[in-house]
């Protein structure tokens, strides 16, 4: 559960609202199924672009090869909080989107309950169409600089597709 919440909080906190060329869906056949329009196309704010329900997985590496999927993850993002679930684990926290470094946006998540309360998870993200790639670090670890899982550094990449 610790990894799931830290992945979810860190990834969402650093997510960018840049609309890029569409990335193939990590879930064949789900490309636009039940998806809401991307607010980036209508000039929405960074937070507005993240709102909704997302489903995906934690990647073993950088998500460039099949078979790198480790664990299913689901997120619900509202203007005020992120709720994560998957593999029976649920966590909750607040988030703040800050600066960017080119294509990568920064996001900071703060746990609001249980063992996560008050812990800050730094992360980065990209949003391309309805695909969100979010990499976050364990609490008190440095912010990731690339979208890649690195267990030794306590960094986890999650790849999500917007459901609604």
Image (cartoon, rainbow, N blue to C red):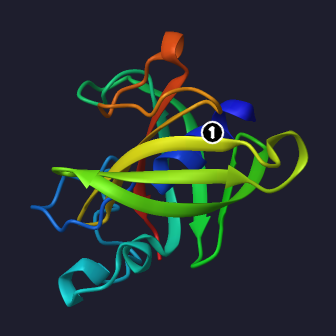
Residue depicted at x 28% and y 63%:
31
In depth, the one of 151 and 64 nearer the eye is 151
Q: Quadrant of residue 157?
A: top left
Report the residue at 37% width, 23% height from top: 67
Q: Please tell me how many numbered marks the rendered image carries.
A: 1
**Horizontal and vertical percent position of residue 52:** 51, 74
Residue 81 occupies quadrant: bottom right
The residue at the point 46 percent across, 53 percent down is: 107
Q: Secondary structure at mark 1?
A: helix
Q: Is residue 15 left or right of residue 89?
A: left
The residue furthest right is 114
Bin the neighbour count of mark 1 within 10 Å (Cα to Cα): few under 14, some 14-19, many 20 and up: many
Residue 121 drawn at (x, y percent): 59, 42
Quarter occupied by residue 150 = top left
Residue indicated by mark 1: 6
Identified at 40% across, 60% down, the residue is 98
Judge left or right: residue 119 versus residue 24: right
* Residue 6, visible in the rendered structure: yes
Which quadrant does the N terminus fall into? Answer: top right
Residue farthest left in this picture: 21
Q: Could you tell me residue 102's position as x and y percent?
A: 16, 50
Decide: is 155 above or below 75: above
Q: Is residue 82 above or below residue 3?
A: below
């Amino acid at each position: 559960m610790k990894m799931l919440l830290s992945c979810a909080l860190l990834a969402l906190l650093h997510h960018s609202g840049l609309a890029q060329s569409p990335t193939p869906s990590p879930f064949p056949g789900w490309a636009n199924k039940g998806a809401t329009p991307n607010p980036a196309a209508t000039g929405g704010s960074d937070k507005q672009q993240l709102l909704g329900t997302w489903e995906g997985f934690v990647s073993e590496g950088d998500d460039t090869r099949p078979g790198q999927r480790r664990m299913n993850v689901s997120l619900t993002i509202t203007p005020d909080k992120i709720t994560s679930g998957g593999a029976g684990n649920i966590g909750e926290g607040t988030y703040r989107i800050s600066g960017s470094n080119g294509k990568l946006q920064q996001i900071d998540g703060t746990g609001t309950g249980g063992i996560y309360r008050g812990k800050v998870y730094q992360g980065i993200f990209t949003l391309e169409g309805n695909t969100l790639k979010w990499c976050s670090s364990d609490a008190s670890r440095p912010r990731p600089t690339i979208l890649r899982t690195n267990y030794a550094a306590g960094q986890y990449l999650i790849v999500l597709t917007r459901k609604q």
